[in-house]
Amino acid sequence: MIANETPQEKQMRFRKKVLEELLATEEDHVRDLNIIMSVFVEGQHNLNPHEVLSLFGNLESILPVNRQLLEGLRAVMDKPPEEQRVGILFQEIADYLKMYAAYCAQQNKSLDTLTLLRKHNPAFAVFLQMCQADSRCRKLDLESFLIKPMQRICRYPLLLKELWKQTPETHVDYEELRTALEKVQDVVGIVNEKKRECENQEQVMTIQLSMVWQGDPYFLATPTRRFIKSESAFRFEGGKKSKIEIMLFNDLVLLAKRKGEKLYEKAVIDINNCILWNLKDPPCAFCVRRSDDKHHVFNIVVSSEAAKAEWMELITSSITKVMFKDGERLAGKKLDELTGKA
């Protein structure tokens, strides 16, 4: 604490510290992006263009954005404290930060690619060891560098929020920072949503590649299909109990028998033709079947009553969404008729 310091002077002192942290960490981030490009990308000669893209994504496009941001922050810091406008800088660059969405969306694919390359490309594995020994890399491996962009984009809202908190309301940067914070939070929301979508599509494709179909192949991996939940459960039929995999998507229920790494189709039930019934015995059981097929009934027993409640809720929610979306086709059908509720 400084003697005779006014509350506003104290606030400005803390604001300066946050600004210094923002600048210093941005310098570190740009340094690490440069290392990825100069050491790992430009230094390697063992990968084809497709492998480079799978591994590093659009990093080459992201780097200029952060260089520009760094130059802007340095220019801001060169001005008198009362004229330092960080908010307008982030407002102007926020849309360009959306390029992080494509990079972060393929992060799991990137790390999987790296694992495969280490295993099947000995020359590249040796190259990575040499890179890690490079003093510029500070003994960090490539994985540590590849996750840095995701970490950085998620940190911007935290830094801007703290900077706004330490900015006096009378400062020219106050309102501009609030607007910038909202824009950057929206960007991070887009990045996270894109990452979730990509991970979901990867999950759908993994199931697709595991399936063995009874008849003509059913193409699961469509742009609008979303995976919701799966469970290894049991089916009761004619007094017999057998294992079954139940998988829920936004528009269908898929039931399959697992044999090793493969899933053998037992039924594909479109949500708009799905009948869901609650079963009281056993208490963690429910029934699903097609509305146009009363003979193929699936009495499913899941792991617990809580799991059953979640399954019932998720399937009912999916049916409801389809009813509202496709009201004409489902005209005359009541939700209670589709979900077995009185």
Image (tube, rainbow, N blue to C red):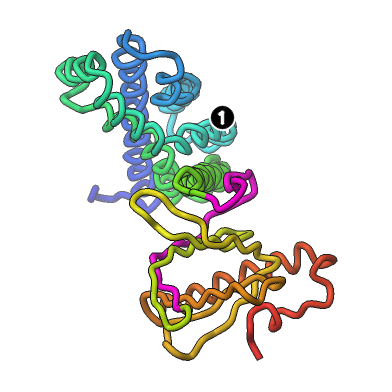
Q: Is residue 231 left or right of residue 122?
A: right
Q: Is residue 320 left or right of residue 288?
A: right
- Residue 306 at x, y = what percent? 41, 79
Give above or below for 31 relative to 180: above
Q: Which residue is mark 1?
A: 96
Amino acid beneath label 1 = Tyr
Does residue 110 show up magenta in the picture?
no
Viewer-nearest residue: 108 or 205: 205
Q: Quadrant of residue 18?
A: top left
> Residue at coordinates 38% horizontally, 68% vertically from top-left?
243
Viewer-nearest residue: 234 or 52: 234
Q: Quadrant of residue 27?
A: top left
> Residue at coordinates 60% horizontally, 59% vertically from top-left?
250
Q: Kindly tell me whether residue 175 is visible in this rendering.
A: no
Q: Callout 1: 10 Å neighbours few (<14), some, many (20+)? A: some
> Residue at coordinates 63% horizontally, 84% vertically from top-left?
340
Give above or below for 231 relative to 55: below
> Residue at coordinates 32% horizontally, 21% vertically from top-left?
31
Q: Kindly tell me whether residue 302 is visible in this rendering.
A: yes
- Residue 92 at x, y = what percent? 59, 31
Instruction: Give the quarter of the figure containing the C terminus.
Output: bottom right
Total marks placed: 1
Does residue 224 show up magenta in the picture?
yes
Viewer-nearest residue: 95 or 297: 297
* Helix, strand or loop under label 1: helix
- Residue 200 at x, y = what percent? 50, 48
Give above or below for 22 relative to 242: above
- Residue 89 at x, y = what percent? 53, 31
Q: Which residues are magenta?
A: 213-236
Q: Quadrant of residue 179?
A: top right
